[in-house]
Image (cartoon, grey):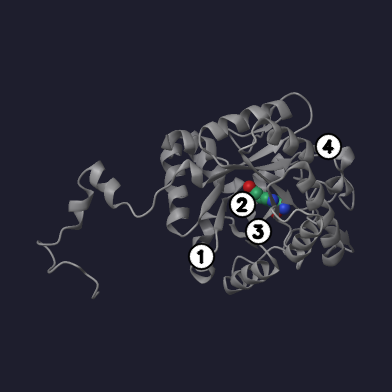
Amino acid sequence: MSRLPFPGAFPTTRPRRLRSDGWIRELVAETRLGPGDLIWPIFVVEGDQRQPVESLPGVDRLDLASAVEACRRARDLGIPAVAIFPMIDRALRSEDGAEACREGNLVCRATAAIKAAVPDLGIMVDVALDPFTSHGHDGVLRDGRVLNDETVEILVRQALVQAAAGADIVAPSDMMDGRIGAVRAALDGTGRQDVKIMAYSAKYASAFYGPFRDAVGSTGVLVGDKKTYQMDSANSDEALREVELDLREGADMVMVKPGLPYLDIIRRVRDGFGVPTFAYQVSGEYAMLRAAAQNGWLDYPKALLEVLTAFKRAGAAGVLTYGAVDAAQLIG
Ligand code: PBG
């Protein structure tokens, strides 16, 4: 390596010198994780009681009053944004997920309530139909296939009601082709040029979404899998093509999901495009840490901060994590 600034090797050069004490490690750290790097995904539910999610220790579905309180605390801890996911009553789910587009649905009410109480907290909402469909898919099903263009039309209406309710960021997580451009055009056409789009651009068909599907009540509901629209974990060139398309269509920020098994994708996207690139430490990744910690097999706070720092090191601008509040408290 020609870029070595020092003359020789051992014993003159001792890399351990820069690890000898906390203060020097702090001084030479290449990556820093702060509360400002975190987006906190929360689950909301009707009623007036929080409900624990069994497969996500430490995570509850929150009634609206609890959600507002939790968001106030998160903001006080320095967390800039939350992402809202709903548990929709079975009776309101349908083949085409129409409830997703209804003004005054649970997501819209949660958005408005949080925005009113904590105005300087950013609110991100998912654009996808899965919590609202009777079959658990992110779009409209016909003959076992998710229809692309028909779904995009519905997603556009969903994004518009979310924006009207006060969402700052809409985040299409559905993986339909062309949805970013359609959502951008609709937002701009209705005077909502300032609403930001975070595209779930490289979203993989993953086994790590299990506990999330529990939390939104689509476990046991989902028919088949999502491999005809979410990406194959074997691919990374394809992730770059997805990112490029979403950026051309108007995405402001992009996301790689899941996180830890896809650090290489985060690095490639960040190096290739230089746009704000976010990692989603998904439910299964978080649950693994919690489960191991419950068994006394690893130290949750240390493992959490290590993983979150790894996302930053890989090039992420920020991370969505169910451990956001824990991490913000730990970082202090
Ligand atoms: C739905 C959506 C999913 C997640 C976020 N948005 C699940 C899925 O695609 O099946 C997963 C998040 C997580 O596992 O934490 N479009």
Q: Image height check: is 16 above or below 273? A: above
Tell whether circle 4 marks a residue whose Cβ is less than 8 angstroms from ligand 1.
no
Label 4 element class: loop
| Residue 45 falls left or right of residue 81 | right
Badge 3 residue CB within 8 Å of ligand 1: yes
Amino acid type of the residue that numbered disc 4 sits on in the rendered structure:
Asp
| Residue corresponding to mark 2 | 208
Kindly report the distance in space between the C-alpha atoms of the residues bearing marks 2 and 4. Answer: 24 Å
Mark 3 or mark 2, which has the lower sequence index?
A: 3
Label 3 or label 2, whichever lies nearer to me, is: 3
Q: Nearer the viewer, mark 4 or mark 1?
A: 1
For mark 3, does the 10 Å Cα neighbourhood hold few (<14), some (14 to 19), or many (20 or more) residues?
A: many
Identify which amino acid the numbered label 1 is placed on. Arg
Q: Visible in this render: residue 220?
A: no
Mark 3, residue position = 200
Q: Nearer the viewer, mark 2 or mark 4?
A: 4
Kindly report the distance in space between the C-alpha atoms of the residues bearing marks 4 and 1: 39 Å
Q: CA distance from mark 1 to mark 3?
A: 14 Å
Query: Closer to the N terminus: mark 4 or mark 3?
Result: 4
Which residue type does callout 3 highlight?
Tyr
**Residue wearing tag 1:** 270
Residue 90 in sight from this viewpoint: yes
Quarter of the image that includes the N terminus: bottom left
Q: Quadrant of the C terminus?
A: top left
Q: Amino acid at mark 2?
A: Phe
Report the residue marked by disc 4: 89
Which of pointers 4 and 3 indicates the residue nearer the eye? 3
Q: Is mark 1 within 8 Å of ligand 1?
A: no
| Secondary structure of the residue carrying numbered label 1 | helix
Task: Please tell me how crowded label 1 is: few (under 14), some (14-19), or many (20+) other residues with Cα within 10 Å.
Answer: many
Q: Seen from this angle, which residue lies furthest left?
A: 11
